[in-house]
Image (spheres, rainbow, N blue to C red):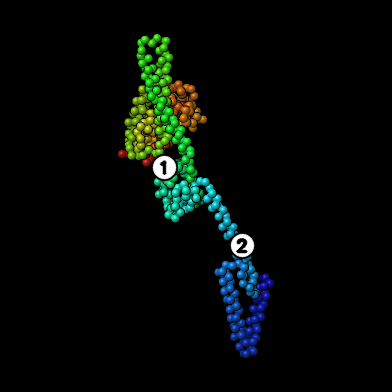
Amino acid sequence: MPKVWTWTLIRYGGALAAGAVIGFLYGLPVLGALVVTLGLLFWQMYNLYRLERWLATGKIADVPDGEGVWPPVFAKIQFIKGKVKRRGKRFRKLVKDLRASTEAFPDGGVILNASHEIVNYNQAARLLLGLKNRSDRGQRIENLLRFPDFFDYLNNPGDRVSVDIPSPSAPETWLACRLIPYGPEQTLLLIRDVSQRVKIERVRRDFVANASHELRSPLTVIMGYLEALGDDERIPDSWHQPIRVMQDQSVRMRRLVEDLLQLSKLESGQSVPKDRVVDIAAILATARKEAFALPEHPEAIEIELNSPANLLGEETELQSVVSNLVSNAVRYTPADGEVTIRWTVDAEGGHLEVQDTGIGIADEDISRVTERFYRADGGRARQRGGTGLGLAIVKHALRRHDAELEIRSRLGEGSTFVCHFPRDRLALS
Ligand code: ADP
């Protein structure tokens, strides 16, 4: 037992004994002991009162004095109090520094809870999103950023890393929004000003669209004269072959110009509205008819329609998707091969499949064939009459319909291109 306790017990025992002895002298030893006990009790009460007051005032230096066990008790509490205060100070400084660094961050950061309500945000987010300090805290983010693309991304990010939206507060400003889940059911919404990138992309797209558009008229004139020359009987025989080559090349060039125009239109657009029903049976039948019109085609081009469901979207774009996939299947499949166009619907959505038994695509090329002008078999693909833009058009048109393209292929065995449409793109009758 610590010395201070031994001494205190001895002193209190002595006081009790003295009280009893004095009481004994008056014939009342118990009363004497009781009076001393009461005195000791009041003394402890008084020290407890001083301890409570000291803790309440919070001033560490004003430690009360005392005697017996109280001074070490006060000293220990003073030590703990000092430690807690120093820790609190350090913690407050850390929070302050952290806040200052997030405020200095050029990107916006918004903390959202599980219900997508705004918990906190930094200065950049305030400026980029036009948030107001009092009223916007606790608001659901989708009420402030009312953009369909953002809404879709927030509720179903899929494999998208981020989504671009116009700033609700600054005109001509575009923001890339990225969701990063962390902690228990919290999400950090990162916002970056990408106006410069969006502007450069728009300039590039507009340039390609304008250049393609401007090339159309002179090309039409050239094609017209070439046709007239081809039909002119006064032209010497030796000219017929070069004129035919020029005609073929100008047809190719027109196809290229048309594809470039179509691609730049698809790239600029957002998600296609779901207000129009596209007849799947009709677009598959049209693609099949077009395939039979191609110079060389397999005899077996079959349609398997496994569901009466249709799609919601833009008919010309979906027609372009199917036509491009079917025309590829036909061009890369020998005459004795088979092409199957299949439409199925399951719990996940609609699946539009174009399968062929053609030349197939090497593993290393599969992930690249949707890039512009990428050709898996180089010059041979060009000779087959392709522009190199077909699958890029397919990819962008599908993206506008919230759909994804899956490519399965084996060299020498054939390829299967599957377009996966989500259920909310289906028109179920
Ligand atoms: P292209 O006009 O050259 O066909 P695409 O963008 O349509 O351009 O296709 C890109 C490349 O992908 C093609 O050059 C070809 O190498 C490959 N490809 C596309 N579809 C098929 C297919 N069904 N079978 C084999 N290769 C294909």
User: Residue at (40%, 49%) from the top-left corner?
Assistant: 143
Seen in the picture, residue 329 relative to 269 is either above or below; the reply is above
> Does residue 265 appear in this view?
yes
Q: Residue 347 is drawn in which quadrant?
A: top left
Secondary structure of the residue carrying numbered label 2: helix
Q: Is residue 19 left or right of residue 123?
A: right
| Location of residue 273 in the rendering, given as x and y in whole percent from the top left corner | 36, 39
Q: Which residue is mark 1?
A: 149
User: Residue at (39%, 23%) from the top-left corner?
Assistant: 218
Figure quadrant of the N terminus: bottom right
Give the distance between the C-alpha atoms of the residues marked 2 and 1, in whole angstroms. 52 Å
Seen in the picture, residue 116 relative to 394 is either above or below; the reply is below
Q: Nearer the viewer, residue 301 or 290?
A: 290
Q: Amino acid at mark 1?
A: Asp
Q: Which residue is mark 2?
A: 83
Rate crowding at label 1 as few (under 14), some (14 to 19) or many (20 or more) other CA atoms within 10 Å: some
Rate crowding at label 2 as few (under 14), some (14 to 19) or many (20 or more) other CA atoms within 10 Å: few
Work out which residue is located at the far left of the displayed protein and give it: 429
| Location of residue 360 in the rendering, given as x and y in whole percent from the top left corner | 46, 27
| Location of residue 224 in the rendering, given as x and y in whole percent from the top left corner | 36, 19
- Label 2 vs 1, first from the N-terminus: 2
Secondary structure of the residue carrying numbered label 1: helix
Q: Is residue 197 left or right of residue 4?
A: left
User: Residue at (32%, 37%) from the top-left corner?
Assistant: 277
Give the total number of marks visible in the rendering.
Answer: 2
Work out which residue is located at the far right of the displayed protein and give it: 3
Ligand 1 location (quadrant): top left
> Does residue 414 appear in this view?
no
Seen in the picture, residue 337 relative to 396 is either above or below; the reply is above
Work out which residue is located at the far front of the displayed protein and give it: 171
